[in-house]
Image (cartoon, coloured by chain):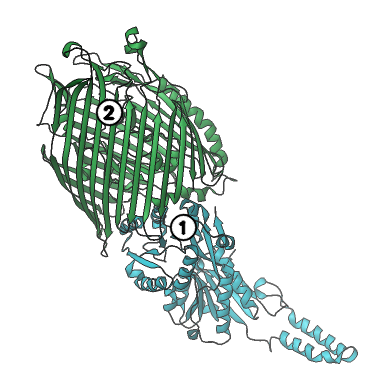
Chain colours: A cyan, B green
Amino acid sequence: MFPGIKSIHNCAIGIRTNCEAEGRVLVWPVAIRLRWFWVMRFYFTVHKNLIALIIGICLWANPVFAEKTSHILIIATSNDAPLQEAINGFKQQVSARGNIKFTEMLLSQVHAPAVKQIDSIKPDLIYALGVDAAKWASLQTSSIPIVATMVLKEDVFRQAPNITGISLGYSLQTQFQWLKKFFPQQKTVAVLFNPAENAATVLEAQKAGLQNGFNLVAIPVESPKQLPFALEQLANNIEILLAIPDETVMSVNTAKEVLLASFRNKVPFIGLSDNWVKSGAFYALSWDYADLGQQSAELALKILNGASIKTISPEHPRKVTYTINAKIAEHMKMDIPEALLKNAKMVFN
Amino acid sequence: MRFQSFIQLVSMIFLPLGLAYAQNDPYSPGGSATAEEKQLFQEIPSVFTASKYEQKVSKAPASVSIVTADEIKKWGYQSFGDIIASLKGFYNTTDHNYGFIGSRGFGLPTDNNTRLLLLIDGHRYNDNLFESFYSDQNFPVDVDMIERVEVVRGPSSSLYGSSAVFGVINVITKRGRDLDGANVKASYGSFDTYKTSASYGKRFNSGLEAFLTGTIYNSQGNTRFFSKEFDSPATNNGIYQNNDYEEAQKLMGKFSYGDFTLEGVYVNRRKGIPTASFETIFNDPRTHTTDQAAFLYLNYNHTFENQLNLQTRVSYNQYNYKGDFPTDFGNQFTPPGIAINKDSTHGQWWRAITELSKVIDDHRLTVGGEIQHDFDQFLSNFNARPNLPISQLVSSNVNSYRWALFAQDEYKFNDQFTFNAGIRYDFYSIFGDTLNPRLALIYNPWEKTTVKLLYGTAFRAPSQFEINTPFFGNLPNPSLKPEKLDTTELILEHYFNDHLRGEFNLFHTDVNNIIAQVSVNNNNTQSQNVNNAESNGLELQLEDNWGNGFQGRISYSFQKTTDSKTNQRLANSPAHMAKLNLIAPLWQDIVFLGFETQYLSSRLVPAKNPGGVIGKVDDYVISNLTVFTKNWVKGLELSAGAYNLFDERYFDPGSPDHRQTGIQRDGITFRVKASMDF
């Protein structure tokens, strides 16, 4: 679980000393004195050649000579399991560098009186999970670099110069390539979208669709009121309905209508996430959340090592997974290749 | 009485089911984890027919019921009448010649279903001679080829014109994509009844979608049909032998490509009549009727880039009916004796309809026009005797037309209030014009609660059969006016949770200018607008889809439908109806039990002649049980059903054309069925 604030002072690789935040007495200077005693004894009695190594260890253990500790603030929109997996992956990867202090916060707790604000935490980098956390972080600071992930749309990376990260959205090329794997025979794909929100994305999707042999039918939906009307068009010429992130069309309030139209018209609906698949989408590209955390960590490490965030472009997830609803496939009388079923992250039966 | 039997039966079922449910409650600790997933595959309430576009049931300006293909299989329905009879407020009757549907207490015996409108895939089906359709094997679509039935109660003439009086039934048939290959079905049941069908459907990569199906149905029927009214040695002690047979052949094809759909339907049905109706000779195997109907339509449906939808449909339709009625005319003929009284009719018409619809801000607008040319409306009746010329030919052939304009707007004030208003102007060359509005205020005080206040009028145009009744001694009546109905209805719908839905309706209906045959001078009869009726009622229903495979609904309806002059309840009008339908999974997703039980209170039987005695048939409870299995072998489905499980002896009211007070329905019957996809 995600505690309100939890600090871990990772003093040394392989040697975890006692930490202030854990409330123990700081005793490492005593340990160093003991080590000096044994160094002298070895030098004179056992092995002179070890001296260089021992000196190195001492220098490494001595804070005076240690590398500067970096402080990373991890702020998450929620404590859902996928976010926690990403945090664990992130911390595991970043910790390999050493000298990292983590402070973890939930977005819902940032206004609590007892919680330190960014000004007082003074992190070297912010790792934001979820679009709300990313937006909050970018509003709080324009100087501290922010690495964000678990955000569906890439707009958030364009909101400020000090933010980069890994979006949840797969590139349209990737999406159409996977569409081809699932539906090699089909040609006509529909996308429901609000022009005010997704006109550019749809233009891009039309290009990517054509490159992969699909004809994209873009159906504008300016308000939820128009959705039933738009869904009627699935009855005739549409073979596949592809979801793109769109607040007007793809929301909890519209889910039933979209899924029902897909179900009744036997037009497979490619959902946005595992939950959409669980609720009746044919399949959805999914994520290895731990790997998302690790991929984010690689960006974070570049920044901590001195790279300018402006030179680090946002990335798509590097590891593609997917979830399948086999029951829906059966209802639509569509066969899924065995290899796709075998490699799926999850199959709902 | 029998209602108590119904209650006992329901209690018996609910007790063990309640226990079973408790064990499978997805919300109880240790309950089924897959419940939430399975809930997906239930039919989420939504309907097209009420407003000619897909909308949530809670937004439809009417009380709506939906029956899905899955339910048809699991409840083992054998005819369209079985499907409709399972719904609140509806009941199905038979005179062993045709099947008739009653609604909200209005189901005059043998009234030809003229006050309900049947649509097949949105195409108006009622014929141009009787304005009718039938719920027996005459029904144009094999029930196994139905994907979904949408039933919209109350007046809908503001959109659909004539016959949309007590409701509109839209039967949505399967498409190529629903089959995606070939299928063969075969069933065998009591009375040596068998039905076989072969179908093929596919959605090709070229974009062409095709569905083809053919069905053959044959039944000996009840080989010893008994009528106590004929219980004398001269009439075989009341036993009518071997003449309850029924034979039907059906063909359907549907092809879609791009914005175009071409669909054709053909049905041919021959039925023996074992009731000696119309004073025909008892136990004469020549007595039968033959009905043929067909339509072919081409539909163009296009949505322009500005999201304006255009739909145009042109259709050719025909209906033929023939009937042989051996009758002993005695001394009316020279030489005296038996002749076969023959009905021979044929009707042909074409229709074109165009609709435009668009969403503009908070309005959803639909406007359209329709024209129908009835270029063939031939009715005839004559007596035929072997080796003698045809005598007393009575016939008519009319060339008429009708057209209409209609408009509808759904205006959403805010998240709570929606206003739906529609109006339609119809012009008939035979009687003039009529204007029919429908208004609906839909109020959502809370997210899961909907209140609907509805008002609408509807009409039923007089049929050619009523205007030019081709019977000897009947006078035509070219001045017949349409029957008019207006209804006010209050509907309360509430979702108690995600899957338990309750509905409560109150309605008041006035029907004016009801057309009936009356005696006129010189012993003649004539159809006239003579009666008015009033119906008040309420309906209650709870339906649930637990998501763990259990599914069910229970309903009660009360209706008092009376003649406005005499204040007497109409014939074939039950005051009370109660229904229970359940589906329970017996084993995983493989074996299901479908059970239904229906209670109908007693009904009056019309007098056999003016001033005669009004009869009554008793109330009854019937129950049907079906076991359905799938997934034993990929593509194989098997089912076995027992109908009228407790062998209830029950009757439907006979019409004045029948000597019988009550027409006996079948006792317990069985059916086994197999279906295989290839």
- Chain holding disc 2: B
Q: Would residue B292 be found to the left or right of residue B405 on screen?
A: right
Q: Which of A334 and A83 is in front in this view?
A: A334
- Residue carrying label 1: A281
Q: Would residue B501 be found to the left or right of residue B387 on screen?
A: right
Q: Can residue B523 be seen in this view?
A: yes
Q: Is residue B155 visible?
A: no
Tell me the SS state at disc 2.
Answer: loop
Alpha-carbon neighbours of circle 1 within 10 Å: few (<14), some, or many (≥20)? many
Q: Would residue B319 be found to the left or right of residue A310 on screen?
A: left
Q: Would residue B412 be found to the left or right of residue B17 on screen?
A: left
Query: Alpha-carbon distance for marks 2 and 1?
Result: 44 Å
Have a look at marks 2 and 1 and say if they share a chain.
Answer: no
Q: Please give the label number shown on residue B107.
A: 2
Q: How many marks?
A: 2
- Residue B396: where, in percent of width, then height? 13, 31
Alpha-carbon neighbours of circle 2 within 10 Å: few (<14), some, or many (≥20)? many
* Depicted B95 relative to depicted B171: above or below: above
- Residue A31: where, in percent of width, then height? 78, 81
Name which residue lies at 20% across and 37% down.
B347
As drawn, the residue found furthest toward the top would be B233
- Residue A317: where, in percent of width, then height? 52, 72
Name which residue lies at 23% across and 33% down.
B509
* Depicted B39 relative to depicted A47: above or below: above
* Depicted B132 relative to depicted B232: above or below: below
Name which residue lies at 87% across and 88% down.
A41
- Residue B494: where, in percent of width, then height? 38, 43
User: Which image quarter: residue B118?
Assistant: top left
